[in-house]
Amino acid sequence: MFLLVLLTAVMLIRPGEVFPDLEGLPIYYWVILVNIVFNFDKILAQLSSRVLLTRPMLCSVFGILFARIMSHLTSMRTFEARAALEDFSKIIIFYLIYTGVVVNKSRILTMIKCIAVFSVIEVAMAVADYQGYYDFPAINAVTETFTDPQTGIPTVYARMCGTGLFEDPNDLCMLITVGSSSCLYLMTRKATSFFWCLPLGFLIYAITLTHSRGGLLSLVAATLTIVVARFGWRKMFPLVILAAPAMLLLGGRQGSISTSEGTGQARIQLWSLGFTALSSEKSPLFGVGFRRYPEYAGLDAHNSFVQTYVETGIFGGTCFFAIFYYSVVNLIRINRHTSGAIDPDLVKMQPYLTGIIMGVITSMMSLSRERTVVIYLFTGLIECYFLSVSAQVPGFIPGLDRAQFNRICKASAICFVVLYLYIRASARFSGGG
């Protein structure tokens, strides 16, 4: 477990970017290699067909790999297919180590604590750099001019960023959302509740420094999900009544959420160009090619689901969608069936893990991060949770049978159609296009 914690720390904090003297050293690869050596048996144990059929999330991860390779092979781009194989194989190895090591509730708790602590460390470095207390060479705030729609007055904002995987304000916000949800869970453990109040308040403060609308929405989505999952719908409404004015009081860029103009409309136009490319290339099954979205739209989609559907087609998009659909559906099932068969400590984790996955989903609606290992750190935590529940109640978490496969495909088709219709109705190109 220590080696996995070390691997997670190196992945999230990136020591080579924090300490210039370590820059260029392949620290992550050294640590993951040691993890492979010591956990090789756990990796192999998950690769049998019998195991795969009991774990739809793991099947979906391998499906994403297949889709990325085929997205290039269908057009005979063998070099790009090999690069996609090498790129995603590293993520699969991490995922297999993760789900092979975190096999019980105590290790899940350890990972939640690690995510909370490492999130606070990463955000603390970002705040220190942003406020001028310390200059981290790898951290650079981005500036953006926002014109208030009410007054027409332009304002230049410096938006806080992090290191490495969190060099974009929205990426940092996703980490803040997951870290905040983790702190909320740890606050429910009476022995340590007071301690986790402080980092939670710090993370909430930090999200205002990013001036990220998507980040704010992800935090709100995660918080409301936790409240509903733990206390029910009725308890959510007072929180909504308090949250709406609070968002308005933020003002500026973060308090102005619109899809009819500004960056909101620009992103919808990017999505529209992607779907146009998918239809024009006549490649709906495996898409236009992994990492080729900018060739058609000029930029990445800034939406992980749209990007995946376009680049890897219906097959790859469905595999990616399945990870989150399966997570949400089965977390809700656990919440509705809190019988004595499931360990009370695992039941208590459910609302907060649901908040984490909903926060990640909301974040990815404004981020193209389907290719980064961080996504699989967060979804892997959910699968580890399911494996622990299944160990206590065999069969409670469904495997990949025909009925489950059909449900996933239908849900993905609905998601694809809703995205397509929304984008077509909302995109407003100049000249009426």
Image (spheres, grey):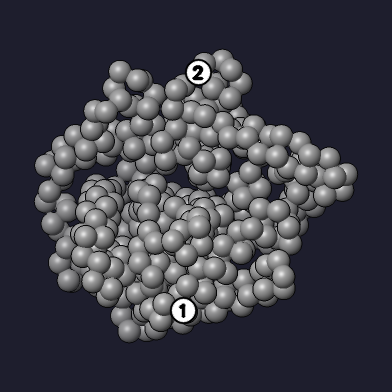
Q: Tag 2: residue type?
A: Asp
Q: Residue at x 50, y 68 (%)?
A: 274
Task: Locate residue 20, reporting x and y percent.
Answer: 35, 20
Task: Locate residue 19, reporting x and y percent.
Answer: 36, 20
Note whether residue 314 is visible: no
Please report whichever mark, 1 or 2, sits nearer to the chain's N-terminal start: 2
SS for dot 1: helix
Q: Residue at x 78, y 44 (%)?
A: 147
392 and 92: which one is in front?
92
- The residue that mark 1 highlights is 280
Query: Is 185 positioned to the left or the right of 12 in the image?
Result: right
Task: Locate residue 365, reporting x and y percent.
Answer: 55, 58
Q: Quadrant of residue 159?
A: top right
Disc tally is 2
Above-or-below relation of 10 to 59: above
Quadrant for the C terminus, please: bottom right
Q: Residue at x 61, y 21 (%)?
A: 131
- The residue that mark 2 highlights is 135
185 and 6: which one is in front?
6
Q: Quadrant of residue 18?
A: top left
Q: CA distance from mark 1 to mark 2?
A: 47 Å
SS for dot 2: loop
